[in-house]
Amino acid sequence: MEEYLLNAKSATSTPSMSHGKKEVSSWYPRVVTFSITTDNKIGPPTEYRSSRDLQAHLKLQAKESRTIYILEGVAPDWIIVVSDHFRLHHSVFADHHRLGAFYKRATGETGGLPFLPSSIQGRQHVSFKYHEALAICPRPTGFRNLCQATRRHIMATRISGKFSEVIIARRKCTVWSRKTEAGGWDCLIICDPQIRRILLDSSGRLGYDVTTSPYNGGYPDFTPHEDQISAPPGPPLTSLLDDVSFYIRNHAGRLDLDDPLCPTVFIENIVASHFMKVAEFVGSTMEKIQWDLSRRDDLSCFTLSGAEEQWSDVQAWKRRVGEFKNDLCGIMLQLHIAPNDLKLNWPASTRISAVDFQFLYLRFTDLGQLISSVNGSLASLVSIAGSRSALKGQNLSLEMTHRSIRDAKNIKTLTFLGLIFIPFSYTASLFSMADGYFPGGDSFWMYFAVALPLTGVSALGYWALTKFSGG
C-alpha cells in the first residue's frame, strides 16, 4: 500500500487537483460531511464531488469543530488530500485497500493484513470487512467477477446448473477518529461505492454495466419502533454512505456526540444486517438443494455430471462460510467482543452490536454444519449416479455380448450350410466336363457317389476343428 500512496503523491498535478475537473471514470468518489453545532445538533450534510473543493473546506475547518467525514471510494488525489490533512498512518488506507487473506489471489486482490490482538492496541481505526447480498441485472455468466470501482471480488452463485441473479459482494468500511486539542474531534469513514460496472478480469479490459438492488428487499430498519414512527421511512439501501447519512440525519438522538466514534453505532448495525441477509441467502440456497433431493421415487433425473457439479458448488459454499466466519472474528476482535459468549438476556449497558455479531457467528457455524450435511448427501448422490452409470454400461456390454453370440450362431449356421452345398457344387463342376454325367445321363449316379462322401468328409473335418480348437 505504501507504493500505492507514493503513486498517489505523484498525481498532484492531475486535472482533478489543479483545475477541479472530475476524473475520467464511470464512477466518482464523493465525500459527505456532517458538522455538530455547539448546541449538540447535527447540521445538514454537505457533499463534495471534487477533491479540490474538499481540500478548500478542510483548510477552513476550526480546531474546535466536530465533523463526520464519509468518503465513498478512493482515488489518488482524494487520498492525498485526506491523508495530508489528518496526518493518517499509512495502515488506514492499507487496511481498507487490502482484502484477501491469501497471497496472489486469482481475483487480483492483494494479500490481507492478519493481526493479533496485541497488534491492534493503539490503532486509531477499525476496519470492517463484510459481505452484501444483491440482486443484479444482467445476471452473471461466470465465476470471475470484479467490482470496477474497488476491484473486489463478487461471488456468483450457481444453483442447479444455472447462475443465480443474486451475488455476494465483498465490501470494506474503515473508521478513523481523533480528538483535537481545542476539544473538537474528527471522524473519517471510508466505504465502498455502489456497484455499477463489473469487470471479467483484473486487467479491466472486459466488463459490462449492471444495475443492483437489495436482495429480498434488503435489511429492515434496526432502530426502535418509536423512533421509526417519528422519522422518514428508510434507509435507502443504495450504498453504505447513503444509509449512514440517513441514520445520522434522522436518528442522531442515539449518538453520543462527545465521542468521535459515535457513528460506528450505525455502521456496526448496518454491517451486521448485511451479514444477516447473506445468511438468509445461504440458508435458502441450501433449502433449495435439499428440496430438489427430497420426496423422490427415483433419482434417475440426476446425471453423474450434474451431481458432481452440485457437489462442487456446495463445496464452494463451505469455503465461503468459512470466510464469513473469519471476517466476523476479525470484526469482533477489533471491537473486543468474545465470539462464544452469547447472552440473550443482556443488561441495558450491554453493547447491542456485540450480541448481533455473536449471534451471526453462531448462525454461520450452524450453516456450516448444514452445508457439510448437504455436501455428504450430494456425495452419496454422486455415488448413486456413478453406480447407475456403471450399471448402464454393464447392461450395454451384456447386450453387446448377446448380440455377438447371436452373430456367431448365425455364422456357424451359414458355415454348416456351406459345408453341405460346397461339395455338391464342386462335384457338379467336376463332372460337367463330360456329357454323360449330366442329369438323366447314364453316369449321373456317379455324381452322388462322389458328392456325398465329400460332404461327409467336410463335415467330419469341421467337427474335428471345432472340437479340438475349443470353438
Image: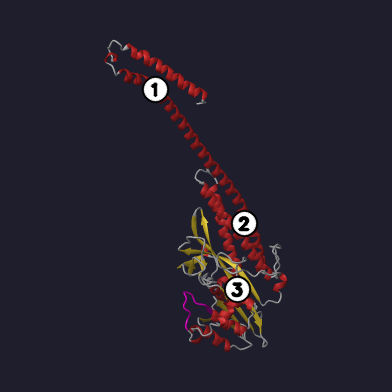
Left or right placement of residue 323 versus residue 51 in this view:
right
Amino acid carrying label 3: it is His
Q: Pick whichever of labels 1 and 3 is earlier in the sequence.
A: 3
| Residue bearing mark 3 | 96
Q: Is 376 positioned to the left or the right of 343 in the image?
A: left
- Are the two marked residues, 3 and 2, in contact with CB atoms closer than 8 angstroms? no
- Observer-side mark, 3 or 2, equals 3
Quarter containing the N terminus: bottom right
Q: Tell me the crowding category of disc 1: few under 14, some 14 to 19, or many 20 or more residues within 10 angstroms, Cα based.
A: few
| Near-viewer residue (26 or 168) | 26
Q: Is residue 68 magenta?
A: no
**Residue where numbered disc 2 is placed:** 367
Relative vertical location of residue 245 with respect to residue 279 in this rendering, above or below: below
Counting residues from the start of the chain, the first of labels 3 and 2 encountered is 3
* Looking at the image, residue 247 lies above or below residue 471: below
Relative image position of residue 208 (x, y in whole percent):
45, 67
Q: Chief secondary structure of the magenta span?
A: loop
Span shown in magenta: 21-31
Is residue 20 left or right of 286 when viewed as pictured?
A: left
Q: Which quarter of the figure has residue 71? A: bottom right
Q: Is residue 22 magenta?
A: yes
Is residue 311 among what the camera can see? yes
**What separation in Å lies between label 1 and label 3 (alpha carbons)?**
90 Å
